[in-house]
Image: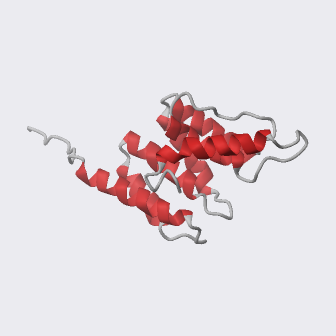
Amino acid sequence: MLSHDGLRDEIPTLLAYQHRAADQLPSDTRRPRGYDRFVLLAAPLLGEHAPVPRQPHLSTRQARLADAIDAELSGDRERAATILHGLVADPTWFWDFPERAALIRNLSALGRFDEIAKLCADTLAPAVFRPAFLGARATCRAAIAAGKKRPNHKRPRSTR
C-alpha cells in the first residue's frame, strides 16, 4: 500500500523497523510473515542499492520474485515483466496486488500500455478483496492515464 499511496518516503522507515524486529529474533525463529516479500517488493522503490534477499529459506515463488526484482534493478525490464507475468498468472490467495503493481511499473517502462489495460481490467475485478486493492486501483489509473498521454505512434503510409 505504501508504494501505491504516494508514501514512498515511509518505506525506508518501515523497512528499518522490520529489519530491527527480524534481527532481534532467535536464529531458529521464523521471520515475520511477509517480511521477505516486503523487502523484495520495496527494493525497486528504494533504488539500485537496495538489498535483494537471497536466503536459502525463500520459497520458490519468492525466489522467482527475487529474480524479477534483480532484473528490474539491472535494467532488464523485459525479463522482469516476463517473470512477473508468470507470478500474476498464478495468483496466491491474496491476489498479489503488489506483484501486479510491479508488473505495471515494468510494462509502463517498456511502453506496453495495451498490456497494462488488460492487466488492470483483471486487477480491478479481483476474486478476493484485500485492502491492497485500493492502491492497485490507483496504480492502474495512473498507468492508464500515462498511456493515454503518449503520442499515438502510427506507421507512415505507403507512398505507392
**Residue 58 visible at all:** no
* Colour treatment of the image: secondary structure
Answer with left or right where residue 104 lies relative to residue 149.
right
Question: At x 75% / y 45%, what residue is drawn?
Answer: 21
Residue at the left extreme, as displayed: 159
**Residue 75: where, in percent of width, then height?**
48, 30
Count all numbered tags in the image, as a single digit. 0
Question: At x 43% / y 56%, what residue is drawn?
Answer: 139
Answer with left or right where residue 78 lies relative to residue 147.
right
Answer with left or right where residue 113 lies relative to residue 148.
right
**Residue 60: where, in percent of width, then height?**
75, 44
Answer with left or right where residue 117 lies relative to residue 148.
right
Q: Does 1 sit above or below residue 68?
A: below
- Quadrant for the C terminus in the image: top left
Question: At x 91% / y 42%, what residue is drawn?
Answer: 28
* Front residue of 113 and 33: 33
**Residue 5: where, in percent of width, then height?**
45, 56
**Residue 22: where, in percent of width, then height?**
76, 43
Residue 95 in which image quadrant: bottom right
Q: Does 17 sit above or below residue 33?
A: above
**Residue 108 visible at all:** yes
Q: Does 131 sit above or below residue 83?
A: below
